[in-house]
Each structure stands twice: as C-alpha cells, then as structure tokens.
Image: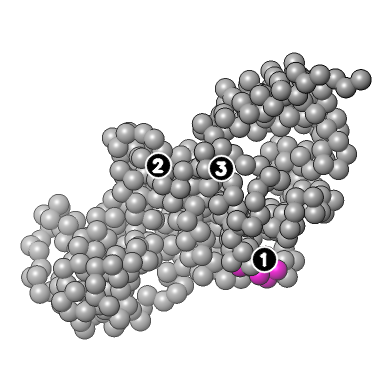
C-alpha cells in the first residue's frame, strides 16, 4: 500500500480535486500548483514510513494549504513561519477536513479548474497544453515532445496561457446550474480536443498517442462527478467507440486504413460494449446532443460486421439531426460521405461545393472532393484537389494516403480500355 507506484497513482488521481480546492483557496494558479507540488513531495517523504492517510485528497489539500500559506507569508514577510510540527502533524486535523470536503465542493472545484484551462480567450493549443500541465500533471517536456516543439517554447506557451487566465479574472464562486451547463460544454470540447490529439497519431510510441487515454480518464472523472449528464455519457461513448478502432486504423507501415477497409476483428470489443451500454443509458434521458448523435453514428459502424452491412440510411438521418443540433460545415462534409454511398458521387459533390469558402484550408475537404471527382472520371480536377490536400496535410500519414489515391487514379487511367 505504501510502495512508490501506489503513491504515484494516488497523487495523480487526487490531483484535479486537490489542485481545484487549492485554487479556490488561493485564487492564483501558480500558488495553487506550487502548494500541491510541495504537498506531493511531503507525501513521498512521509507516506512510506507512516502509511497512507485515509483520505489522500484531504491530506494533500490540508498540507498544500499550509504550505501555500507559509510561502505567501514568507514572500510578504507578514509574520514568522509556524513550527514544523504544526505543519507536518496532520493526524488529528485530517478527519475534520475530510468531513468538510464533501463531494459538492469537489465537483465545483474540478469543474472550475477545467473551465479555467478552457478559457475562451485561449487558443485551442494553449487550452490543451494548460489542461495537460495543470489537470493531468504532465511535464512540460512531455507536452513539448507531443506537440513537436522545444521545451522552452512550450514553457512560454503555458506561461502566456496562465497570464491570460490571471488577467481575465475568472470568478471563483460556485457556478449556477446554467453556468455549469455552459462550462460542461466547453470542458467536453477540451477533453475531446485532447482525445483527438492522441487519436490522430499512427505511432503508438509517440508522446501524443497517450493523450487519448488521458482524455478518457478525464471523461470518466467528469461522468463520476456528473453521473446524470447524458452528453458526458455520449462523449465517453464516442471516445470508446473511436479508440476501439485504433488497432486497425493504420497499417504496419503507418499508412491510414479507411474505415471501410479496416480489419474489424482487430476492433476492441470491450470498449465497444461499454460504449453501447453508456449510449443506451444516455438516450433514455431523451435529451439528444452532439456527442450522443456522433456516438450513435459510430455505434452503427461498430455493429456492422462488414462494411457492406452498414446502415447508411440510419446514419444519414443521424447526420441530419446533428446538422440541426450543431450546424457546421464539417458535419455537412461528413454527411456528404453518406450521401455518396446512398445517392452517388455527383449528389455528394453538389452538397460540398458550397463549402469551398469555409473549408478551403481543411485537408479533409479537398481529400473528399478529390475522391468524388475521381469517381466521376474528372481526373484533372481530382488531381488538383488531391494536390491541395497534400499541401494541407498535418501528418506524413495523411500526405501518404492522398499520394496513394493519386497513384491509384493514374494506374486506373493507364489501363487499356476493353473492346
């Protein structure tokens, strides 16, 4: 119970609750983070000898609060530091503070902490970096490697994010039900962004590949705090369904394998089963939201034993519902794939042509448009669209996939026409 692996796990699990409570107390992100780190160091020194406390989170909050107060006093020179025994002896105080730290406070503290990381003034990359540093506790070095930037550049990015949050003066009072709903939407978006940073990686050893697992951990944490929120159920189900396909999404050479070409025997059935159970529970609330609808679409794919068994009509209905709930050119672009399956490439092309201005800088727009043009035999225009997609590719795997499409188109064009 007191080995270092257990202590590391306990500290990581307690981090969002403890750091959120310290942030509420000190109202300063740097001070709260320093106080939590000092509490963790003291835990590593004392827990192996004295044994773990009954409530590790309460212990960390209590010790971190005392440490933070001492640091503030030292900086301001208000008064002398208290005796070490006053700080270190938490045996009697722990029970009292554990009773006062109820689930309601924990819930609002974690939500506040996540919401601060999701401040709307921050670019998405800074939101993700700040959440991974503050909420998940990843090192700057780990985050920098994942984003393929230098450690100093990532340090500056996180520092700027903290400064912007401090300047914005984020309120610390308990959010109202309406504010909580708004914040949950933002937090869900942040968690899904983190998930996609990891999910897009072909190399499972890449630092960013672990982000998808961390996003699932955060999703589980939020659902534990808000167990009756159907959109959180939908978000978690969506991530489960997508991650279930990870073993089949890339070839051994790191090339993208399209959904219809994937070996479905490689899909993780445990993830799929958990996702379907969550989705069924969410839909019983009769409050369909974007994540539930996206999860429902993914669920139809997961239920199809073969690509040709896919119920495209049902998927089209779900995409139409998603367009009503969350209108977006990207949603329409995705529905165009379904339309091509049901009604052919021309109708799908007609659907996406009006999106050219909004999605002109989007890799997947030009990739889909090139594919539709290729199906229609308009190879010259298809090549132009494919070239544009390669220029916008965010990874070597994306660029290689489009080059494969070009090579395939040229091979088909070179074949002699039968008499």
Q: CA distance from mark 2 to mark 3?
A: 21 Å
Quarter containing the N terminus: bottom left
In reply to whether residue 279 is colored magenta, the answer given is yes
Query: Does dot 2 land on a helix, a strand or a loop?
Result: helix
Which of the marked residues, 2 or 3, is nearer the chain's N terminus? Answer: 2
The residue depicted at 51 percent of the width and 33 percent of the height is 395
- Residue that label 1 marks: 276
- Residue that label 2 marks: 146
- The reply, left or right, for residue 303 in relation to residue 144 is right
In reply to whether residue 5 is colored magenta, the answer given is no
Q: From what the image shows, is residue 29 above or below residue 160?
A: below
The residue depicted at 38 percent of the width and 56 percent of the height is 136
Which of the marked residues, 1 or 2, is nearer the chain's N terminus? Answer: 2
Q: From what the image shows, is residue 38 above or below residue 46?
A: above
Query: Does dot 1 land on a helix, a strand or a loop?
Result: helix
Residue 98 sits in quarter: bottom left
């Amino acid at each position: 119970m007191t080995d270092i692996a257990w202590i590391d796990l306990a500290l990581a699990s307690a981090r969002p609750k403890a750091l959120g409570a310290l942030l509420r107390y000190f109202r300063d992100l740097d001070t709260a983070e320093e106080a939590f780190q000092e509490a963790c160091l003291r835990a590593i020194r004392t827990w192996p000898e004295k044994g773990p406390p009954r409530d590790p989170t309460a212990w960390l909050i209590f010790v971190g609060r005392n440490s933070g107060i001492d640091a503030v006093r030292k900086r301001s020179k208000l008064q002398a530091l208290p005796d070490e025994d006053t700080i270190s002896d938490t045996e009697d105080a722990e029970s009292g503070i554990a009773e006062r730290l109820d689930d309601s406070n924990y819930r609002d503290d974690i939500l506040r902490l996540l919401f601060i990381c999701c401040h709307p003034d921050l670019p998405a990359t800074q939101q993700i970096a700040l959440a991974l540093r503050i909420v998940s506790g990843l090192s700057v070095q780990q985050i920098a490697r994942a984003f393929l930037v230098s450690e100093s550049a990532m340090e500056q990015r996180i520092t700027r994010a903290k400064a912007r949050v401090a300047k914005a003066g984020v309120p610390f009072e308990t959010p109202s039900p309406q504010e909580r709903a708004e914040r949950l939407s933002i937090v869900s978006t942040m968690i899904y962004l983190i998930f996609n940073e990891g999910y897009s990686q072909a190399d499972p050893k890449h630092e960013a590949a672990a982000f998808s697992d961390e996003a699932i951990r955060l999703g589980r944490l939020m659902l534990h705090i808000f167990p009756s929120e159907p959109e959180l159920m939908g978000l978690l189900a969506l991530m489960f369904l997508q991650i279930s396909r990870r073993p089949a999404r890339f070839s051994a050479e790191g090339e993208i394998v399209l959904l219809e070409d994937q070996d479905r025997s490689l899909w993780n059935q445990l993830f799929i089963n958990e996702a379907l159970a969550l989705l069924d529970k969410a839909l019983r609330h009769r409050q369909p939201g974007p994540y539930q609808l996206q999860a429902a679409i993914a669920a139809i794919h997961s239920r199809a034993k073969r690509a040709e068994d896919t119920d495209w009509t049902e998927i089209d209905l779900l995409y139409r519902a998603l367009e009503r709930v969350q209108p977006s050119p990207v949603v329409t672009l995705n529905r165009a794939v379904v339309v091509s399956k049901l009604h052919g490439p021309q109708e799908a092309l007609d659907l996406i042509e009006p999106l050219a201005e909004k999605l002109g800088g989007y890799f997947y727009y030009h990739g889909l448009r090139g594919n539709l043009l290729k199906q229609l035999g308009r190879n010259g225009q298809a090549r132009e669209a494919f070239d544009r997609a390669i220029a916008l590719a965010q990874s070597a795997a994306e660029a290689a996939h489009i080059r494969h499409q070009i090579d395939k188109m040229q091979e088909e064009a070179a074949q002699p026409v039968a008499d």
